[in-house]
Amino acid sequence: MRLFFLIFTLAATALAGIGVTAVLAAGMDGWQPIVVSAGIGAVLALPAAWIATQKIRAL
């Protein structure tokens, strides 16, 4: 379980950052699009971290 949380922390930070960068590059300013894109990135990190954890444990 610790491995999952470690990978989730890294993946959520990366995906939220990508989302925020994409929103800002698209010219959408304001706090709402930034928060929504960061939230979507964090939610997408859940299955990514789960899959990565399972693949690492299978090694």
Image (cartoon, rainbow, N blue to C red):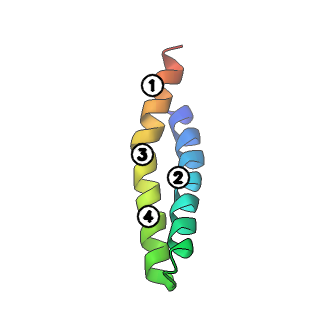
Q: Who comes first in sequence, dot 1 or dot 2? A: 2
What kind of residue is marked 4? Answer: Gly
Crowding at dot 1, Cα within 10 Å, few <14 / some 14-19 / many 20+, comes out as few
Q: Who comes first in sequence, dot 4 or dot 2? A: 2
Residue drawn 55% across and 46% down?
Answer: 11
Residue that extends furthest to the front in the rendered view of this protein: 26
- What is the spatial separation of the Cα atoms under label 4 and label 2, in whole angstroms? 9 Å
Spot occupied by residue 49 in the image (x, y as percentages of width and height): 48, 39
The residue that mark 1 highlights is: 54
What kind of residue is marked 2? Answer: Ala
Q: Who comes first in sequence, dot 3 or dot 4? A: 4
**Up-down: is 35 above or below 59?**
below
Tag shown at residue 12: 2
The residue that mark 4 highlights is: 39
- What is the spatial separation of the Cα atoms under label 3 and label 4, in whole angstroms? 11 Å
- What is the spatial separation of the Cα atoms under label 1 and label 3, in whole angstroms? 12 Å
Q: Who comes first in sequence, dot 3 or dot 2? A: 2
The residue that mark 3 highlights is: 46
What kind of residue is marked 3? Answer: Leu
Residue drawn 41% across and 61% down?
Answer: 40
Crowding at dot 4, Cα within 10 Å, few <14 / some 14-19 / many 20+, comes out as some
Q: Are the residues tagged 1 and 3 within 8 Å (C-beta)?
A: no
Left or right: 47 as drawn, with respect to 55: left
- What is the spatial separation of the Cα atoms under label 3 and label 2, in whole angstroms? 8 Å
Q: Who comes first in sequence, dot 4 or dot 1? A: 4
